[in-house]
Image: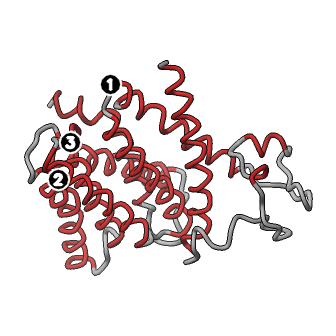
Amino acid sequence: MTIFYYILVFTYGLVIGSFLNVCIWRIPLGESVVKPPSHCTKCGTRLTVIDLVPLFSYLFLRGKCRYCKAKISIKYPLMELLTAVIYLPLFYKYGQNGQYIEFFAAAYLMSILIVVFFVDLKHRKIPNSLVISGLVGSIALIVYNFFIPFDIYGDGNWWNPILGMAVSSGFIFIVSLISMGLFKKEAFGFGDIKLLFVIGAYFGWKMSLVALCATLTISTLAVLVTTVFKRDDKRGNIPFGSFIAVGTYITFLFGGEIVKYF
């Protein structure tokens, strides 16, 4: 039965990953993620069910459009596979212990952050629609915690997620203000601050500190590596939202143990 659950989660991840492909492509362009329906980017033909089975359609069609035979980018099945692989450790951490609300909450936020990772990496921006989607989940968790303690918070205090919002985004906001005052330049984008506001509600104040430290550590290492190899970012900033996504995933998997250790 356990194996069946993992297969189910893996399949669920493939399906969601297919949808995330659409989000990553359309959201930065300001397009709807539901209209028009999925179609070949080369010939424009509307795709049917047989063309849209996650991962398997790509393999069955040998990476080519069924209509015009144009090559399909391998990034699409890889995104589906990536999402499924990201879900499995989350299910191992939460789902197999019966913490299904925690698992689906983590999967929901990580789905949003997968889109954030690739959009910010390419466009250096975090669209408001993604932040709002995360905020909807945050509000749902705050309400849920009023009635049933959300396990990730570590306690049943109603103010924990609210304090988490202040801790996670407040620090970055203060650093940005200091940077503007001293150097006349933003240290972080407002999109990063809003995203951390959402993540604070998911984690509560203790886990938010872990997520923030993990994010800052990873981003600092990335900057050092690019400096050593002299690969300067000509756009003048780093994709901090992408690092937030990685730091958040690390916190979902190991944040509780880190908090207990310290």
Is residue 59 positioned above or below 192 on the image? above
Examine the image and state in which quarter residue 56 appears.
top right
Label 3 secondary element: loop
Disc 2, disc 1: CB below 8 Å?
Answer: no
Pointer 3 or 2: first along the chain? 3
Circle 3 sits on which residue?
A: 150
Q: Earlier in the sequence, mark 1 or mark 3?
A: 1
Q: Would you say 7 lies left or right of 255 here?
A: right
Q: Which residue corresponds to the image point at 15% horizontal and 61% vertical from the top-left? A: 166
Using the image, tell me which numbered label, if any, was put on residue 97. Answer: 1
**Which residue is tagged 2?**
161
Image point 91% across, 57% down: which residue? 69
Question: Which three-letter amino acid code belongs to the residue tagged 2?
Answer: Pro
The nearer-to-camera label among 2 and 1 is 1
Percent coordinates x, y for residue 121 in the rendering: 52, 61
CA gap, disc 1 and disc 3: 14 Å
Which numbered mark, 3 or 2, is in the foreground of this view?
Answer: 3
Residue for point 68% across, 68% down: 37
Question: At label 3, which amino acid type do we have?
Answer: Phe
